[in-house]
Amino acid sequence: MNPRESMLAAFSGKKADRIVWQPRLHIWYEANKKQGTLPKKYSGKEILEIYDDLEAMPRSYHFYNSTIKCNEGNDAELWVRNDREAVFTKYITPKGELKEARKKTVYGAASYVTEYLLKDVEDFKVLTYVLENQTYEFDKNLYEDVKARIGNRAASTVNLPHVPLQSLFINYMGFEKAVIAMWKHQKEVESLLNAIEENHNKMMKTLMASPIEIVNFSANIHHDLCSPPLFKKYILPYYQRATKDLHSTGKFTTSHWDGRVSLLLPFVKETGLDGIECLTPKPMGDVTLEELHEALGDMILVDGIPANHFLPWVNNRTLKEFTLKLLNTFKPHLIAGISDMLPPNGDIEKVRFVGKIVNEYEL
Amino acid sequence: MPRTKNEKEILERLRESIVNLDVEGVQKACEQAISSGIPAYDVVVHGMANGMEEVGKKYEAREYFLSELIIAGEVMKEGMKILEPHLKTRKTKPVGKIVIGTVKGDIHDIGKNVTVTLLGAAGFEIIDLGVDVPVEKFVDAVREHKPDILAMSALLTLTMPEMEAVIEALRKAKLRDRVKIIIGGASITAEYAKKIGADAGVREAFEGVKVVKAWS
């Protein structure tokens, strides 16, 4: 089996011949490339060349995501100004305008919102208009290009945007304002959440008609943001509806949960998801591998080794013990990786070290 | 101060209304308290604050979550609108002043924001510098605001050394001895805090609040 087939076998409950080692290296790569601190042997190399040198596989949504294109409606103008330190976005629509500002982090590999699109409930109608008029299309030519580059290193995966409630909290309004809006204007908030879901449904329909094999729901689930009552009311039913649709066309589904999740794990099997990505174990997260395994059962864990185990001062014995424990606990329901990704000061040779353990592990 | 049965009942209703996130109940209890002659300051300290303390305990016990903390703060604000005109002659003094921020290179603010909410409920005056805060901004804030405590947050292991850089810069600026320093984040340990010259290191927001309350 090639790694792509091994991944799909794990997801479909068939016997795989290996656990796939799929560490996310993009932040490490982009940050070090920008600072000129890539190891000498990787200077000028593409990220896939580094993956190959490490005998590791890429998480393919970093490549396939751009195959799904979002088109704005005819009456909605989108302006984006990308400066060295910030990105400014403006929507101009017949219903009004929305503005957003994002500041780039010191390494330029990520950004965070400094001015949210939604300032108050009055802005909801503008965003609803934007979302209702967006359409999605699948870029077949780009897909073929990406497929030729990725080959059989990984099954094709695309990210959906943050699940609606997390979109409101993280992308559109900010947590505090959104919580207060939910308290004061529940009907309006729920109407907006429906508009976000309808927008996602358009993207999902495009994905369902495409050859993409795995759909990953961005979510950044963390029980402090998304408490059990909010999860049960808004997120669980969304997952159930969406996974049912995606499964009907043979897609596998995962979702990215990267915060503290102990209070939400009791609901994980009800989501309909085939696997969960990240799920950071202790000491970075708040759950042990055993607790994760008990909650997930036969669901796939994508990742599993806390990122801080890849820091230069962590000894390889500790890393090896953790890796073997992960493999023994989750096999065969595992795509091994870093929870959440290799940090810019992570030791790339530890990625090779773990890869050797995973690749030699006999199922 | 001895109270009548009626006054005690009003303050208890106010406390319960805060805990139940019942904004109308809070408004009604505040109006009753004022019309019954209970000093507004006492309404805040013995009614509102008791309610917020209970909300904090429920958060710690995982009965309440961050969203309930935020709503409790909003409910309290509605009550304060009624009490504020009566508080003019006696301002409530903050328990202490804290400068807080997530260090440079780190944009994770959940832990910091939980801490801010809990500290606010505990009566601290908070200067929140936000996320991705450079060393100089921490130093300038300590110089300008003269806080009792400096709190720094970092989730990423990569950004933890920034905390040490802030402490070193405070030493150079001869400001280190003026503040107690607490650091927090998923990878923080007491040993790391000691190693870099902080006074305390915690992983959870409510642990941190316990520490700074003990300092005040």
Image: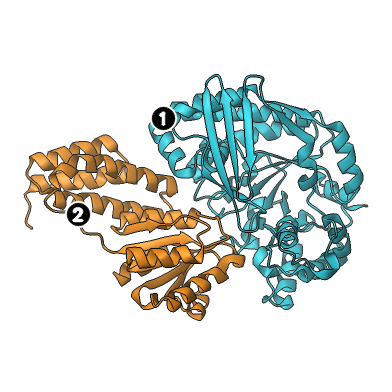
Q: Quadrant of residue A362?
A: bottom right
Q: Chain of mark 2?
A: B
Residue A152 appears in the picture as rendered = yes
**Is residue A328 found left or right of B123 in the rendered image?**
right
The chain letter of the cyan chain reads A
Q: Quadrant of residue B170?
A: bottom left
Residue A251 appears in the picture as rendered = no
Q: Is residue A138 above or below residue A315?
A: above
* Amino acid, disc 2: Val
* Rendering coords of residue B77 (x, y %): 28, 43
Is the residue marked by circle 1 packed among few (<14), some (14-19), or many (20+) residues within 10 Å? few
Residue depicted at x 51% and y 36%: A233
Residue depicted at x 85% and y 37%: A143
Q: Chain of mark 1?
A: A
Which type of secondary structure does the marked residue at label 2 adopt?
Answer: helix
Q: Which mark is residue B212?
A: none
**Is residue A51 found left or right of B55 in the rendered image?**
right
Q: Quadrant of the C terminus of chain B?
A: bottom left
Gap in Å between the C-alphas at discs 1 and 2? 30 Å
Q: Which mark is residue A185?
A: 1
Question: Which residue position holds label 2?
Answer: B45
Q: Nearer the viewer, residue B166 or B112?
A: B166
Residue depicted at x 25% and y 53%: B49
Q: Quadrant of the N terminus of chain B?
A: bottom left
Q: Colour of chain B?
A: orange
The color scheme shown is by chain
Q: Nearer the viewer, residue A312 or B137?
A: B137
Q: Nearer the viewer, residue A321 or B125?
A: B125
* Amino acid, disc 1: His
